Image (cartoon, rainbow, N blue to C red):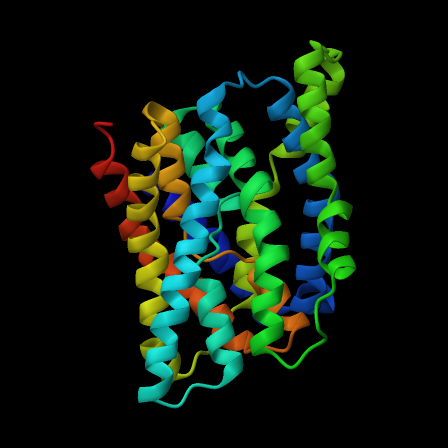
Amino acid sequence: MFDSLGSLFIIASMGVCFKLIRPGNIGPDTAVNVINTSVINFFFPALCFKVISTADIDKSILLLPLSATITILLSLLISFVTYAVIGKLTILSKGEKGVLILTSSFGNVTFLGLLLLTDLYGKNAAEYVLIYDLFAVTPLVWLVGTAIASYYGSGEKPTTKKILKPVLKLPPVWALFSGFLANFSGLRLPSFLTKTLELMSMPIVPLMIFSIGLTLTVPKLKYLTISIPAIVTKLFLAPLITFGVALLLDINGIVLKSTVMEAAMPTMILTLTISSQYKLDNNLNTFVILFSTVISLITLPTTAWLIQGY
């Protein structure tokens, strides 16, 4: 795991270098947009279909979304109460509160989770990552996350159409359902298509980590202090909550380990998109992503060690 985390740090640093040097006179915003669009519309759907169409799906795997949903909702509640209290003790803008609540609850479960879980538990762990994300995290981001962002931001108000439309238009969601259909029908793809899907799956993690480096900015000193409760909730409380929920749901083995590790992931990159849309504090959002990712270099291996006997 330490090798994987070290590799991610180097790749993110390359993104920072790209931002500073601007090769080809390409700005970081343009590069991030191209990377994110390519991954979401082409590479990630290929991975979703490839993994789910060949997965060995059982009852315990299908409990992952329930565990994730409970963890995220409790994290949101804890963070909401925490920052309501802190807001009475110090000056926090609504935009800052909104960012801190979002970033404390939604993790980088796919792009970082894919690398670490497959490294820890083998290639089959990819199916746990995708089901955890696309059946729980992604819907909650767009259903609950956008409502929170709208409340604390000054952007447009969410409507049912505006909330559901992004989810239904996501190619990975359709690829996931197509993968289930292929799996249950016993469909077997020709070898050249399987190889194509495999090749398209390979660049996802480095591209998304590279994009983190492209978004980094110099933080304000205030960000360090106000983000600590969000970091504690995301990296410490969330995996603890998930562990308890998993035991109650009788989840065990690699599935239990996977769901706890997913809950322990640092802040989700997608929260930046929501912050921007609803005019929250984007610089604070970027800082929490970076801060939580750096701290996770310690917390993730520790979490993996603590649960290795279950």
Q: Is residue 237 above or below residue 89?
A: above
- Residue 248 in which image quadrant: top left
Q: Quadrant of the C terminus?
A: top left
In the foreground, 149 or 282: 149
Q: Residue at x 67, y 23 (%)?
A: 180
Residue 19 appears in the rendering: no
In this rendering, position of residue 59 left or right of residue 37: left
In this rendering, position of residue 71 left or right of residue 187: left
Q: Position of residue 97 (x, y in %)?
A: 46, 77
Q: Residue at x 27, y 52 (%)?
A: 298
Q: Position of residue 249 (x, y in %)?
A: 36, 31
- Residue 261 in which image quadrant: top left
Marker count (numbered) = 0
In the foreground, 196 or 93: 93
Q: Position of residue 71 (x, y in %)?
A: 41, 49
Q: Residue at x 33, y 55 (%)?
A: 235
Q: Quadrant of the N terminus?
A: top left
Q: Position of residue 192 (x, y in %)?
A: 75, 16
In this rendering, position of residue 175 left or right of residue 300: right
Q: Residue at x 74, y 59 (%)?
A: 160
- Seen as rendered, the residue at the extreme bottom is 91
Q: Is residue 92 above or below residue 6?
A: below
Residue 159 appears in the rendering: yes
